[in-house]
Amino acid sequence: MPDVQSLVNDFLNQLKKRKIEGSQATAKQTAELLRSFISQHRVPYTNQAGALIDAVRTVGEQLIAANPVEVAVGNIVRRVLHIIREEDLSLATDAIAGMGLSAASDDEDDVERDDHPGLSAVAVAAAARSTLRPPSLQTLLEDVPDSAAIPQASSSGGDSEGKSRSVDKSSRGRKLKHDVIEAINELIQDIATCHEQIAEQAVEHIHQNEVILTLGSSRTVLEFLCAAKEKKRSFRVFVAEGAPRYQGHLLAKELVARGLQTTVITDSAVFAMISRVNMVIVGAHAVMANGGVIAPVGLNMVALAAQRHAVPFVVLAGSHKLCPLYPHNPEVLLNELRSPSELLDFGEFSDCMDYGSGSGSSLLHVINPTFDYVPPKLVSLFITDTGGHNSSYMYRLIADYYSADDLVVKGRHVTRC
């Protein structure tokens, strides 16, 4: 098995050099790396979940710093931290249920905490509170199997009791890691299949003889449109080319290869063509907790045109793109400036140099941002792998995937991208 630190270093280099394209690939590789890290990390006998959380947070801070533009890295790190907390709480609940505990005295609580040092105090306290609460509607609807009780330690003798406790501590550590790794495997599977789960909903939103507008290139949008075509829906697609990278040209070729009627338009023609459109369907780089969208540059213009003509603006995004951060300051949103060579050839800059000043500084400056911010009021509907949601509901959906404690990085609460 390769050294986990070498795997971390290799992944850090790929992030810094921008060698990983796309949020899905980044999220999947981040989850796989954290799975390998957890499987090889040795946890202590006491406070196992806390030690594992600290280790994962340390690695996660390095990954986020390597490429802060790719929000999916931080999303997966926080998802894994949430998984560890949930599995720790589940083990604590099973331990309390197995011992037949109820609301007992403080002395009895102290005894139980001594008997189960591998479980975090926070998890034991939360589990005790959960036993006194009625189940929520979501819990009743979910198909959760009955948990097996944790066997009690034998009290036949001092030596045998000590050995059994030691074995019990070790087994609990292995149980925690096993459950966390299984949950991460499910997360990786969800990331890999999010396109299919979103595409299954296409027939509910795309109807006969409609005109759909999109911008740039998105695999999620491609699979969504093709899924509607496979359900015998006949519609036409307008693709804005997405300058300066012109990713829309690639999407148009793939749509035509799948048999869809496609029209390529310039980005500046969006407002002129929007009156002919029934729906705008686009992908996203990230979805913020307030329902705002970080998307490829140009989509804010499309969203404004759609609002002006009362055209539904629909955003497709997998759950790994749901970010728990709030963009309180839109002018400093996380963005990235790409190379000016995408707009102008380097040879053209020679005619724009100020040779008279003697400094040779250029009078021409090129700004080539990667992303736009689309405020939640411009989004009509989000379609994720869990269904369709309004922008006002996104913060509640995101709350199911993240813990509030995991938004703190190096003692500073993160509230913006």
Image: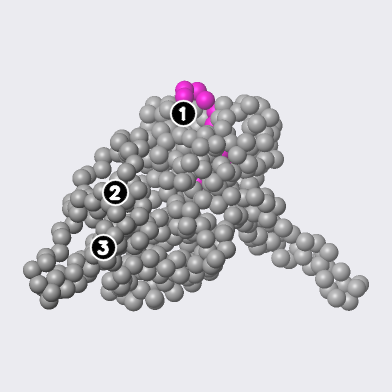
**Residue furthest out toward the left:** 156
The amino acid type found where label 1 is placed reads His
Seen from the viewer's position, the closer of residues 99 and 410 is 99
The reply to whether the magenta stretch includes residue 311 is no
| Left or right, residue 84 beside residue 153 | right
Q: Secondary structure at mark 3?
A: helix
| Residue 385, position as x, y percentages in the image | 41, 41
Provide the residue span drawn in magenta: 207-219
Residue that mark 3 sits on: 111
Q: Is residue 170 above or below residue 96?
A: below
Q: Residues within 10 Å of mark 1 (few under 14, many from 20)?
A: few
Q: Is residue 140 above or below residue 328?
A: above
The amino acid type found where label 3 is placed reads Val
Whether residue 316 appears in this view of the structure is: no
Q: Secondary structure at mark 1?
A: helix
Residue that mark 1 sits on: 205
Residue that mark 2 sits on: 103
Q: Residues within 10 Å of mark 2 (few under 14, many from 20)?
A: few
The amino acid type found where label 2 is placed reads Ala
Mark nearest the camera among 1 and 3 is 3
Numbered mark located on residue 221 in the image = none
Nearer-N-terminus badge (1/3): 3
